[in-house]
């Protein structure tokens, strides 16, 4: 779909900044509408000169008196639509925003012509701290008013509107005309099922910049607006919940942070509370011992024919939310902060349809396997309650990781079921490959090992899939990154990279229940919870290349703390060339049986919130 875009600049007495702002925007060749919101005479003279200088592309509109930023923006949007444009890029006149990002907004609109494209500010040291922290209160209210974290920043003055959608709203609803306009129009567009896309953009505050934000009255107006919107949300609550399972009017993508976004419709990987986290709903870490953040389980709809790969599921939960949980933990302690996990998990339970389905699928397999094995009858049954407890366990796991790296978990809180194998290995001074799973909390053990210096433990992870949560962990402990080895696959180059660590007596911890993103086809089918599931070949290929001992390791949360299970798996893994496939299948099956054993022991603590039994060759739920 083609778009016809223009730029709308509301201005009030920014005579010193408007010239540079227009000059930086003019290089992009887009028509510009400057809306003078009743400026003083000196500013009018500057605007008249600019209108003459850019006569071919600049249209100057004058409002008879100062009506407020919202009034100026609405006048500009209406004028742009009347002139035949389909999209309008709103940008403030004060020069705070990076005009070089204009092409990114236009490209995003071409990709998703029905979406509102929002700037998500990336501040430098010039930002006033009062503004930086104060605006987060509005962000929280907007998330409440929309029952969503979709609108990442509701106050940024750099955004692109689809004009048909925006003008339909402003012509039918009485919107505020001052600083509260930017907030209210986004919330009401969300209520109308508009889609949103966020683009990180640099924001700089000039030392001599002019601000027209009235600390008293604009805050009063914004508070009044939030009051209206909260009551509006309550009135629309059934509709908003229904919209969670309905497509929005456009393509919803979040180009945040460069990592989670380029991966196809917001990834989401098995994590939970990472703060508000709670719930990478399903996903948080791109897989490894350190990537399951507490933040959030999966939120994206599963693909029908070919289920979405785990690495394409985005990390849910904001860096801010995770950081706030970390701060709360530091100031008020673990017990008080843990109370926040319950409403966070409830939110992700309601909004994470894909995570709920994946959880139910897992419990169906677990229940069926327990029935066929004549196991005890306490196996959780699929449903909302089991999904809530599942996601809550995930959130608590991420929270405990944070607490461990922050030094708020004592070694006494973690004990071995049988320490003999671990103690013998450490005494030998040998390195080893340790295979774990997204079961329980491997990160807890690595943090304690670093603090106690009992063993050299390095996690081999795909950290790009949980960058935000890992940044929070790194901020909690400077040793975090030093004991992290990021890889893209388990090929020969990776083996060479790890050989030195093994020779130095380190324990390399990887997981065996996910496939690296670049090794999508390197799997071996094994029976797991009563059905065939694809398991990664990488751990066994890597163990063969390293020629080192292999152990299995699981760390499960129990009533009195965490209990670690460390058991020998193989003194050495051999993969004869002619029988390679058979040997790989045997090792994968052996691992799957041990994983199944521990899943039965702690059924709520397996955190793969995607269709584990599906593969490129099979449809959902593992059926051929």
Image (tube, grey):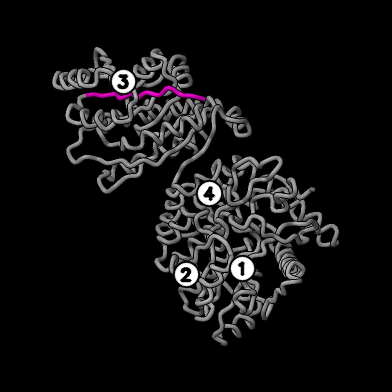
C-alpha separation, residue under disc 4 versus residue under disc 3 = 38 Å
Label 3 packing within 10 angstroms: few (<14), some (14-19), many (20+): many
Q: State the extent of the magenta-drawn residues as a range.
A: 1-12
Q: Is residue 181 above or below residue 616?
A: above
Residue located beneath label 3 in the image: 33
The residue singled out by tag 2 in the image is 483
Helix, strand or loop at label 2? It is: helix
Per the image, the residue denoted by label 4 is: 315
Residue 423 spot, x, y in % from top left: 59, 83
Query: Which residue is tagged 1?
Result: 555
Residue 380 image position (x, y, % from top left): 74, 54
Q: Are marks 1 and 3 in contact (CB under 8 Å)?
A: no
Q: Name the front one of labels 3 and 2.
A: 3
Residue 82 sits above or below residue 16 on the image: above
Helix, strand or loop for disc 4: loop
Q: Earlier in the sequence, mark 4 or mark 3?
A: 3
Q: Earlier in the sequence, mark 2 or mark 1?
A: 2
Q: Earlier in the sequence, mark 1 or mark 3?
A: 3
Viewer-proximal residue among 328 and 584: 584
């Amino acid at each position: 779909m083609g778009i016809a875009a223009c730029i709308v600049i509301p201005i009030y007495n920014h005579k010193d900044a408007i010239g540079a702002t227009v000059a930086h925007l003019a290089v992009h060749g887009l028509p510009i509408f400057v809306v003078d919101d009743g400026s003083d005479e000196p500013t009018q003279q500057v605007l008249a000169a600019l209108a003459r200088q850019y006569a071919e592309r600049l249209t100057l509109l004058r409002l008879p008196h100062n009506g407020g930023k919202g009034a100026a923006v609405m006048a500009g949007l209406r004028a742009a639509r009347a002139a035949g444009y389909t999209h309008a890029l709103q940008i403030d006149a004060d020069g705070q925003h990076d005009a070089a990002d204009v092409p990114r907004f236009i490209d995003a609109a071409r990709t998703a012509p029905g979406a509102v494209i929002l700037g998500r500010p990336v501040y430098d040291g010039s930002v006033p701290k009062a503004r930086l922290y104060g605006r987060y209160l509005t962000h929280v209210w907007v998330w409440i008013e929309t029952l969503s974290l979709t609108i990442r920043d509701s106050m940024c003055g750099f955004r692109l509107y689809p004009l048909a959608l925006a003008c339909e709203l402003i012509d039918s609803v009485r919107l505020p005309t001052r600083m509260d306009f930017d907030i209210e129009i986004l919330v009401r567009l969300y209520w109308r099922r508009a889609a949103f896309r966020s683009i990180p953009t640099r924001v700089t505050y000039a030392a001599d910049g002019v601000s027209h934000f009235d600390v008293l009255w604009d805050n009063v107006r914004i508070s009044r607006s939030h009051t209206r919107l909260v009551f509006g949300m309550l009135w629309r609550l059934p509709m908003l919940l229904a919209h969670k399972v309905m497509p929005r009017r456009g393509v919803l993508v979040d180009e945040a942070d460069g990592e989670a976004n380029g991966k196809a419709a917001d990834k989401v990987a098995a994590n939970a509370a990472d703060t508000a986290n709670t719930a990478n709903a399903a996903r948080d870490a791109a897989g490894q011992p350190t990537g399951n953040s507490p933040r959030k389980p999966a939120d994206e709809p599963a693909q029908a024919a070919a289920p979405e790969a785990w690495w394409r599921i985005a990390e849910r939960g904001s860096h801010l939310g995770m950081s706030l949980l970390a701060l709360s933990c530091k100031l008020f302690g673990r017990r008080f902060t843990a109370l926040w996990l319950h409403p966070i998990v409830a939110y992700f339970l309601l909004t994470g349809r894909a995570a709920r389905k994946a959880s139910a699928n897992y419990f169906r397999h677990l229940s069926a396997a327990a029935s066929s094995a004549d196991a005890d009858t306490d196996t959780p049954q699929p449903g909302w309650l089991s999904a809530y407890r599942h996601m809550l366990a995930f959130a608590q796991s991420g929270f405990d990781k944070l607490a461990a790296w922050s030094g708020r978990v004592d070694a006494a809180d973690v004990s071995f079921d049988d320490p003999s194998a671990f103690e013998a290995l450490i005494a030998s001074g040998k390195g080893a490959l340790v295979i774990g799973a997204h079961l329980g909390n491997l990160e807890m053990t690595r943090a304690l090992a670093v603090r106690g210096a009992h063993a050299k433990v390095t996690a081999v992870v795909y950290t790009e899939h949980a960058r935000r949560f890992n940044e929070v962990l790194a901020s909690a402990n400077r040793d975090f990154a030093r004991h992290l080895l990021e890889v893209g696959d388990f090929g020969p180059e990776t083996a060479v990279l790890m050989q030195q660590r093994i020779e130095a007596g380190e324990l390399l911890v990887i997981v065996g229940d996910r496939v690296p993103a670049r090794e999508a086809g390197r799997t071996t089918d094994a029976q797991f919870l009563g059905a065939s599931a694809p398991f990664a070949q990488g751990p066994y290929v890597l163990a063969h290349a390293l020629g080192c001992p292999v152990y299995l390791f699981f760390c499960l949360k129990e009533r009195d703390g965490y209990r670690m299970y460390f058991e020998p798996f193989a003194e050495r893994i051999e993969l004869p060339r002619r029988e390679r496939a058979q040997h790989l299948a045997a090792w994968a099956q052996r691992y799957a049986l041990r994983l199944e054993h521990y899943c039965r022991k702690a059924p709520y603590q397996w955190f793969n919130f995607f269709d584990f039994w599906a593969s490129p060759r099979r449809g959902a739920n593992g059926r051929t």
